[in-house]
Amino acid sequence: MTGADMKITAVRTFLMQAGPSNSGKPPRQIIPVVDESQPRLPGSRNWLFVKVETDAGITGIGECSGWPRVIERAIEDLSSLLIGEDPTHIERIAQKLQVAMMGHGMLGTVGGGALTGIDIALWDIKGKALGTPVWNLLGGRVRDRVQIYTHANNKEFALSAKTRGFKAIKCSGGSGLQDPVRKVATMRELLGSDVDIAVDVHGPPWLTPIDAARLARALEPYDILWLEDPIAPDNLDGYKRIRDASTVPLAAGERVSGIFGERELIEKELVDIIQPDAGRAGGITQMKKIAAMAEAHHIAVAPHSGSLGPVAEYAALHLMASIPNALMLERMEDDWEGRRQTIVPHPEQADGFLTVPDAPGLGCDIVEAFIAGFPSQGNVSVPSKTLDDRDRIGGEGRLYVQTRLRRGKYFNAGDE
Ligand SMILES: [Mg+2]
């Protein structure tokens, strides 16, 4: 089967509530957007999977992040453009969908998420039709396994990760923004120099470029692998200021979509590591292009994938198997026990690496019956309280743009 006589017959979506968390991570509140009587679900979020069916009996699966509940509707809207198309002409379909979405504005993460789920599914179909893994369609394999990193925000979890073979961990800011330097110092002392440490402060709009530059400088002695999203992604000029002020490697790119979303970060060399989100960057097609753009600037690729579901992870694995500048993949392996039951087979993990799958296509399938047991309940998340919340607005919520008072409290740890 070459696909010459294959046509898309249906596009189905599977939206689920993944969680609640059992990882002991700082809680995140999910605010139900439909039914106010629903319980708040600490640590949970939505996963959206797509299944594209063909008249040849071959189906492909994909995954979308970006705002899954909204993207489900976007895919429903777009599906009429897919019916009857030959699924093997992946770039042609991507172009058709992008033209169809132009009237809604820039691609964004909703459009990017829709494009991604469909794109991954088409690569899956093409691989299955040709009897070969997706990485083989992308130029073949550069590596047999992909290094992963996990999140570790306390000593116990960091030591456990090291014991389990992880060669890298990430201290994730979130509510831990208060003491980032102290936290990194503790981790470095605990883990030694054999384990890489990345730091993510999640692009806080209340951290100005000059404060972020000071944070970056304070982190220099600890030789971190990267400082991620040090300021809001809206402020690219701010990245330049941080970069000029510090030698700490910077990473960003998870919140934008497609080659146009990542272009300035790469072309202006504002980052050392580019982090396209495996569920909303535009799919394997766009991520391969983003990786090539990055390669030309000696920028490494570390896809954002941690909170995504397992299908996006598979897609990232195939991409990273095939590109020279793949650094490592984010993985929250134990964020929810249901992760393992959502797809078959679960990827093979050993010694801080995932094995690159060998089966035709992506090499996995979703378990529809399991997914049906976890209907979506809400998908708007608010990070837990921060220093700024408590001090300025009584924990009632957080403004996107905030002025900063009490800088000394934030930087105390760095000055010690
Ligand atoms: Mg991040």
Image (cartoon, rainbow, N blue to C red):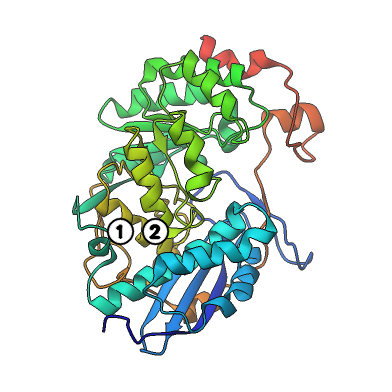
Callout 2, which amino acid? Ile
Could you tell whether 365 is left or right of 101 in the image?
Answer: left
Numbered disc 2: secondary structure? helix
Q: Residue at x 23, y 71 (%)?
A: 359
Horizontal and vertical percent position of residue 59: 39, 81
Badge 2 residue CB within 8 Å of ligand 1: no
Near mark 1 (Cα within 10 A), the count class, few <14, some 14-19 or many ≥20, is many
Q: Which mark is residue 318?
A: 1
Could you tell whether 408 is left or right of 97 in the image?
Answer: right
Looking at this view, is 38 or 289 the one in front?
289
How far is disc 1 from disc 2 in space, using C-alphas?
A: 8 Å
For disc 2, the marked residue is: 284
Q: Nearer the viewer, mark 1 or mark 2?
A: 2
* Position of 181 relative to 30 (above/below): above
Q: Are the residues flagged by discs 1 and 2 in contact, CB closer than 8 Å?
A: yes
Could you tell whether 224 is left or right of 50 in the image?
Answer: left
Q: Residue at x 73, y 61 (%)?
A: 32
Looking at this view, is 294 or 174 the one in front?
294
Q: Quadrant of residue 77?
A: bottom right
* Position of 101 relative to 374 (above/below): above
Horizontal and vertical percent position of residue 380: 68, 55
Callout 1, which amino acid? His
